Amino acid sequence: MKTRLKNLVRMSRSLSARIAVLMTIAMLPVGLIAVYQTQAVIDSARLQSRASLMSQIRSGATSERELIENALAASNGLAVLIAKLGEDNCGDILRGFVEGNDNYIFAGFVRSSGWLACSSTGDTMDLSGRDTVRRAMERGGASVQLVQNGAVTGRSIVIVTQPVRGDDDEIVGFVSLSIPHATVLSKLEDPDSEGGLRIAAIDIEGDLIAASLGLDAAEDFLPRDIPLSDLVQGRKETFQAPSGTGEDRYYAVTPMLEGKVMLVGSWPLSSVPGTDTTLQSWIAIALPVLMWIAGVGVALFGVQRLVIRHVAQLRSAMRRFALGEREATTLELTDPPAELEEAQRAFNRMALLIAEGELRREQDLKDKEVLLREVHHRVKNNLQLIASIMNMQARELETDEAKHVVSELQRRVRGMAVLHRALYNTPTSTTVDAAALVRAVVSDVQDLVGPKVAPEIDTVLEQIALYPDQAIPLSLFVAETLNNTIIQACRRDAGDRIGVNLSTADDGGICLSIDSPPVVDTGTAPAERLDGMGRKMITAFLLQMGGTMETTTEDGRYRTTVRFPRAAYGA
């Protein structure tokens, strides 16, 4: 996942990607204008089509709307009369109204408690348990409802209710007018059987009031997956959806009586032009997209031919040059632009100068390495010559004390000669292997004391590269300590053994330990029996290495342990 993300980031920063972005930004205003204009034309056509559809619906339901509007107006007038005259003459007023209007079969006044107080038929009863009464009271205003079985008439009717308000403007009841359902259906005839238009009227709770071809046929053309209550809430004005028969139809929703009755119109898709909104949207954006593809394609082709392929050759030549391929570094571009041709000449000049400089530097390094090795070789020879002269001088000395002093100086000079010999033999000429150095010092000490005096020396040495600033005092410290241990602690027995251990500590420093053989006098460690010069030299060597020394004893054997940090170059 991280690799893919890195690749995407790298591609997004490429020249082609940036050219595509710039072309997109340049062409964006033109594309937006084209999309806007095309979409504006499509929207205008849709609005006209929608207005035409709404007009067809309202035209097909004109008779039904007039019937219900008249019923609402009549119920409102009856509500005003009952509020002014009271319930005494209520029955006569309602009876006279129904007898003078053929569209109504019942009129009644229902108190807010649900009691039918008076009616055109003279019936009174408790209607508080009827859903029609509960809904009328909950709505608190004029309403239209379909009732399959009227409480008084026992017929399928459409009830129009109007609240009756008292002096304090509180609802004291409502007037109810009943219209035969057959009368309502007759007003909503099939308006356009050839065009396939079907109309349905629903109340504000989503209950079907009337429909083209009757209520039983309404399920076939109404939306299958959308409840009628959602249509009442005005969720959509025009939309496409499958009908009850599974046919995709086009629907339009518009109020017949605002807040009371909604009309739902339904058409087959074939009879409504411009209903394929997806195709219209694709047409709106097709031209700008084609323009963008053509523009970006031409730009990328030009960039590829004029820039990217030449840059790729330049990058390849630079990579080969960086990897050390100096034989075929000349860059030759094919028909490059003037700017890239100048870059080609600059690269070739740079490669030539760098190659020549590297040759001179390599020769200088070889000369310096030969010179440095010669210096170490001559210093080693000079130190060996000095040691030989001191040996010749010691033979002419008469006192043992003078011979001892010269012998000690000779030994220390030989120790420094051992270091320069190691530096001369090392491949780097700048660092020396501490293990090889200590091993050479041990061998030189054994040679100096002679095979009869020299004990067995066991070494466990780890290969550690040290700079001369620490290697010199380390070799001298080892030579001084070993010589002192041999003189002070060894008894010239076959069991005398000295242990020398060199390793890297956990903190990255260097740890050197020298174990002496068991000594008879355990009161004083060999390191504590050094003369004044030896003690001063040990202290000086420790100071040069930047280390610390610790002496411990176990079973008569003394261990001298030195710890010092490994110095960096030039420290």
Image: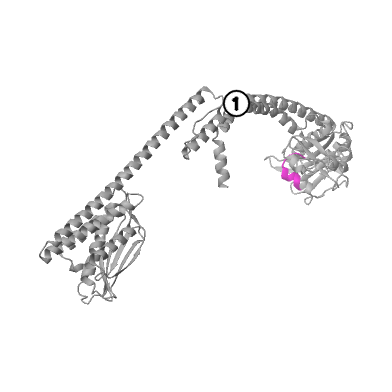
In the image, the segment drawn in magenta is 134-143
Q: Please report the residue visible at 35 percent of the width from the left and 59 percent of the height from the top.
A: 507
Specify whether 207 is left or right of 502. right
In x, y percent, where is residue 459? 33, 66
In x, y percent, where is residue 384? 23, 55
Specify whether 403 is left or right of 278. left
Q: Amino acid at mark 1?
A: Gly
Q: Quadrant of residue 195?
A: top right
Q: Please report the residue visible at 17 percent of the width from the left and 56 percent of the height from the top.
A: 389
Q: Please report the residue visible at 77 percent of the width from the left and 28 percent of the height from the top.
A: 49
The answer to which of 518 and 230 lies nearer the viewer is: 518
Judge whether 567 appears above or below 209 on screen: below
Q: How many marks?
A: 1
The answer to which of 257 and 343 lies nearer the viewer is: 343
Secondary structure, magenta segment, majority class: helix
- Mark 1 highlights which residue? 302
Residue 205 appears in view: no
Q: Quadrant of residue 491?
A: bottom left
Crowd rating for badge 1 (residues with CA inside 10 Å; few <14, some 14–19, many 20+): few
Q: Residue 184: within the magenta?
A: no
Judge whether 513 appears above or below 149 on screen: below
